[in-house]
Amino acid sequence: MRMWGGIWAAGACILVSIVGCDRGATAEAPIHPVDAAEAHTGDAEGGTAKAHPSREVEQEGLLIGEYRLAGHPVVDGDTIRVEGVEGSIRLLSIDTEEKLRGKADRAAAAKDFQKYLKGKRGDAARPRKAGTPMGERATEFAKAFFEGAEVVRLERDDPKEIRGHFGRLLAYVFVKKSGRWTSYNVEAVRAGMSPYFTKYGYSHRFHNQFTHAESEARQAKRGIWNTDAQGYGDYDERKAWWNARADFIRAFEHEANRRADYIQLTHWDAPAELEDKLGQEVTVLSTVDRIQHFKGLVRVLLARQRGSGFPVIFFDEEVFRESGIDRYRREPITVRGTVERYEKGTYRTLQVVVREPAQVLLANLPWPKDANQAAE
């Protein structure tokens, strides 16, 4: 745990990590002693701390720090780069459309956009990502938003959610405009460049702000909500799916707030928590990453960081089929079972064995009719 800049700051971090909030509270006191809510809703005045590469970027806490933007900082509408942080930063609670890539896609989208979209989706049960003109617009919006900014402030939604599945730092990003910290994430939604993205859970800290910003954008028919926009156009379907996932995750988080045997595998300290629970029963939450069939068993790897996963073992194929997991690739599930250690040669891992289908709980997703599997 990092050392906080004062007793007030530590208290704020503890409060937020336990109950969450939508008041813009931060883990550390702002540069000037203003109310924490004001620091991120547009009312904080005063100077900005000198940006510097942080050696604490991987450590738990809501405040990551203040950083100078890298040269050509905008990757796309929901990804940026800053000096002092390795790799790109995936911005939380937004998911802008992809940029058009390659001459073939550009030509196809320009010739018949609806046919282009239909071809990109194919027979997938879920909407897929594809490059669109709206993805181009979102990137240009981001470039304009960050233009002239010397320093940005990065913060987390959850002190323990540090990097995503692909290793990118997860953050909200704030820019000081007219002396006020302004959330790019929220403003991108307000401008109609992105929906409020809930596929990986509702925002703990700014749920109301995102909800109101999206409502405002939809009512004004901005960006992706304009019927003439060349974008996905299927956000009602996407959001029904995302919100079903988010409801499932929120129900788990509610239990985890009061139970020590609930472990979210994407938390940085999940391995240590599992080690502490060796021989005890736990409930773990994550998405299904890979399913591997071997002679005599099925191994389901629940996602952690890229290249690693937590094994859930089925020795009975019938139990695996009855669990319904096969349909839930890349979807969230919970598994309850005793933490065991498996060793063979130099290979060592912790795992859970599923002996009854009831040990597995699946999210109640709005599956398309006759869909046989989850889409990308």
Image: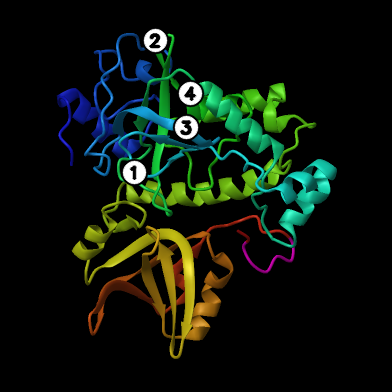
Depth check, mark 3 against mark 1: the one in front is: 3
Q: Amino acid at mark 2?
A: Gly
Q: Could you tell which of marks 2 and 3 lies nearer the N-terminus?
A: 3
For label 4, count other residues whose C-alpha is less than 10 Å away and answer few (under 14), some (14-19) or many (20+): many
Depth check, mark 3 against mark 4: the one in front is: 3
Q: Which mark is residue 179?
A: 2
Q: Are marks 3 and 1 in contact (CB under 8 Å)?
A: no
Q: Which residue is mark 4?
A: 146
Q: Are marks 3 and 4 in contact (CB under 8 Å)?
A: no
User: Over which residues does the magenta segment extend?
Assistant: 369-374
Q: Amino acid at mark 3?
A: His
Write the residue at 61% across / 50% down: 241
Q: CA distance from mark 2 to mark 3?
A: 24 Å
Q: Are marks 2 and 3 in contact (CB under 8 Å)?
A: no
Q: Could you tell which of marks 4 and 2 lies nearer the N-terminus?
A: 4
Q: Secondary structure at mark 1?
A: loop
Write the residue at 81% across / 46% down: 114
Q: Which residue is mark 1?
A: 86
Q: CA distance from mark 4 to mark 1?
A: 19 Å
Residue nearest the observer in this picture, 40 or 51: 51
Q: Secondary structure at mark 2?
A: loop
* Position in image of residue 183 (x %, y %): 46, 24
Q: Which residue is mark 3?
A: 72
Q: Quadrant of residue 171?
A: top left
Q: CA distance from mark 4 to mark 2?
A: 15 Å
Q: On screen, 351 above or below 150? A: below
Q: Amino acid at mark 4?
A: Phe
Q: Quadrant of residue 69?
A: top left
Q: Are marks 4 and 2 in contact (CB under 8 Å)?
A: no
Q: Is residue 357 magenta?
A: no
Q: Quadrant of residue 132?
A: top right
